[in-house]
Image (tube, rainbow, N blue to C red):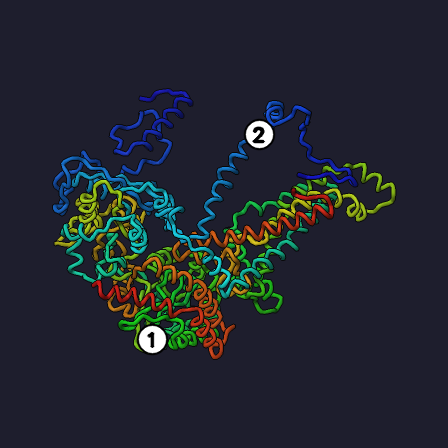
Amino acid sequence: MSVKISRRQFVTTGAAAAVLAACAKQPVTEAPPATAVPATEPPVEATLVPEAEATQDLSNTNLEQIVRLSEQKITLKAFSCPVYTTTDVTSFNEQLFDKKMEELTNVHMQWEHAAEYGDAPFELKMASGDLPDVIAGVYSISLFAKYGQKGAFEPLNDYIAANQYFSTVLQNDPIVKAMITAPDGNIYAYPRYLEVGQRAFGGFFLRQDWLDEVGMDIPQTIDEYYEVLKACKQANPERYPLAGYSTSLGFIIWQWGVGSRGPNQGSDFYHDGDQILYGPIQPQFREALVFLNKLFQEGLVDPEYATLSDYAAAYKRWTDGIVGIGYGWADDFAALMKADPSMQLVGHRAPKGPYGHQEVLSNHMNIDPTNGGGLTITCSNKEIAAKYFDLYYSRSGAILMNFGIYGDTYVEENGELKYTDKVLNDPKLVPMEYMWNYVSPTWIGPMYMMTAQERGLYTGKVGEAQILWDEEPWQTIQMPPLTFTDDENAVIQEVMTDINTLVDENIAGFINGTKSLDTDFQAMVDTIRSLGIDRVTGVYQDAYDRFLSAM
Amino acid sequence: MIGTDARSGQGTVELPLKRGRHSGWGKALRRHYWLYLMVLPTVVYFTLFAYLPMGGVVIAFKRFNPFVGILKSPWVGFAHFTRFFSSIYFGRLVRNTVVLNLYNLAVGFPAPIILALLLNEVKRPWFKRLVQSITYLPYFISTVVITGIIINFLSPTVGVVNQIIRALGAEPIEFLNQPQWFRHVYVWTDVWQFVGWGSIIYLAALSGIDPTLYESAEIDGAGRLAKVWHISLPGILPTIMVILLLSLGYMLSIGFEKVFLLYNPNTYVTADVISTYVFRTGLQGAQYDFGTAVGLFNSVVNLILLATFNGIARRLRQESLW
């Protein structure tokens, strides 16, 4: 039966339905008025399992360790960075993980999210004088340590000892304790713990179709790498095969066994045994630059690598067919494959350098030092908050965080956990995106990241590349994440700004030939020494010694 | 305040404030309360957002920790300034900042004036409007997009400019990788972006010139160029002076965004300016105190420059900001 309505009635009822739909946090169980068509897209919660329909038993499978923490409902004010979403989900409170944790533990985390990424919102919170109970997000362990040492965060050592799950992690992997301990001996944040198979999210990759074209195999050594580059260039002189990554070619320099930094790429400091060394003043560093200079002169390196700070512009070099061999994250790999499926990318191990090194120095080690979760000094219920975070490291908590709800987002087949179609085949989102929009914070804050997750979420060539990149050892000289005291930080900041500028300028000049490696390199080394690099190396050494003794 | 130029008889802004024997704030307020009401939001805005926060400048002398707060952070005296001045790059940074600014001023300041003078001579209104619209469109494009366009156009492999150069038989030029090109690229693209918008105020000033002056000059036998030189230019001279003074006040704080997006380590030697240097410092631990110290240094120098030029302007032409 049809009902005649006026245009105004149509619009107002439609608008009202839209407002209702947008405001509702719970699934809308009644349909909007039959005469009106919702003016906006269907609300997010349409994809979440409405509580009425889920079978209580199945949805709590594998979650036995998440127990009720309090008879009365406890609410904790929590602060985090923005949710990493590509949909209209704006808060952890809307995700399966948070809802299930609240249902089972009886603890409600009232999440407040910052407006932007970066340390600034965190620092603003510190300055505001109005601290929440808990802060957890993409805030580094050293940031928590910095403010913890000033008295903003509660030392967690006793709480960890009093609860079982995280302390089990520490027992099994003692290096973690060293990575999260501040110089004063306290632990101020729970970390994002990475199982093996989770740590290498970036590495070398190249175009298999180019290799096929020149009839060569994946290069195993740096010399073979050079031959491949030359062959690809000969096949098509318009190419400049080697791509820079984030304006840097540091990933090649690492193969000489020295540290080199570019944005997001590791550190200039590295260790040789127990000793901390500074990369750019080492003779091997110079050798690496000689190699890169040779590549540049022969047209094997993208001459514009230094200007491509925008990733879209960088990708375009790949899709234009100008570069085809290089380095990047799994996300870059996936994005490039998607942009141009004819680009048959394949991941490979770092080519072995002249001293036998195969280093990728920018991946995580046992923890992701850029994430953390801590209790503020004013937390209203520290014991409960500590227990809550501790649950993240139980098997149940890890499953809930990494896989979601049994029957809804994953199932168990022959003892293996597998994602359901809902996650793997969402029409708009890739599996990883589905997880971090609707299911759990994955990537944000303290947690236990399980191996199987990556294998399930990165499929195809990307998945293969990930597995290959994570074959140990891929970082024998990488410095672990270190924490510093205020004074040490001051020394680092004071000295390194100028040194970093000097090094960046010079590296660029050495590679493109405007500076001479015969004469100018020594001049650079002398200037670096005169600027006080030894003070900073000393500071790093102290921090590293503290690290070694804290294990 | 714009003073009067007795020679050209140009109008000025006069406050209709009558001072009598019994005048004082009270009477003035009551009589002209509309004016004060109109100015009130601005005063409040500046008090709250410009004057009150000035107290925070004290962190330039402290080792600032946001959690402990401004008052409780420890004093370090001039340590930040010493660190900045003793950097091996200090000289270069100041030099680059000043040179880039002067160059920008030398080219970018006259350009809108010339455009306005030229447009003023155009007889066909549709053409004038067309040129105006086209020239001031780039002003609205954001810096990020502009630099993206620049990088693309100047690319040695795929850029239009280099394709033309290659077609003419020459080697492609790596504009953004060679330090000697940086300043030219920066300044001339700025001209392109801002000349249209900048000419608006001059066109407005030009329209305020009494047309009878032109007529009498015509009668006296003045040609086009003479009219421009003797009537148009002096007519907009007060406007020019004010804008020049305002521009000079920014000598040390060159826009950070565009330099940051266009530079790279290859061009640091000419492109690295004070603001980009401090930004890189800031990446290592959000050093608000150091950033404030450099900002304070910037502001003090700007103030000195501004006061000096204002004094000179006042003495020379009785045109000044205050």
Between A174 and B51, the one nearer to me in the picture: B51
x 44%, y 62%: residue: A497
Between A275 and A453, the one nearer to me in the picture: A275
> In this figure, which residue is indicated by the disc labeled 1?
A353
Chain bearing tag 1 is A
Amino acid type for the residue under numbered disc 2: Met
> In this figure, which residue is indicated by the disc labeled 2?
B38
SS class, disc 1: loop
Amino acid type for the residue under numbered disc 1: Gly
Q: Check the image and name the residue furthest to the front.
A: B21
Picture disc at residue A525: none
User: Quarter holding the C terminus of chain B?
Assistant: top right
x 42%, y 58%: residue: A315
Q: Is residue B90 left or right of residue A156?
A: right
**Other residues around mark 2 within 10 Å, as few (<14) / some (14–19) / many (≥20):** few
- The lab-note entry on whether marks 1 and 2 share a chain reads no
Q: Is residue A443 above or below residue B44?
A: below
Q: Is residue B233 above or below residue B36?
A: below
Q: Position of residue B216 (x, y in %)?
A: 84, 39
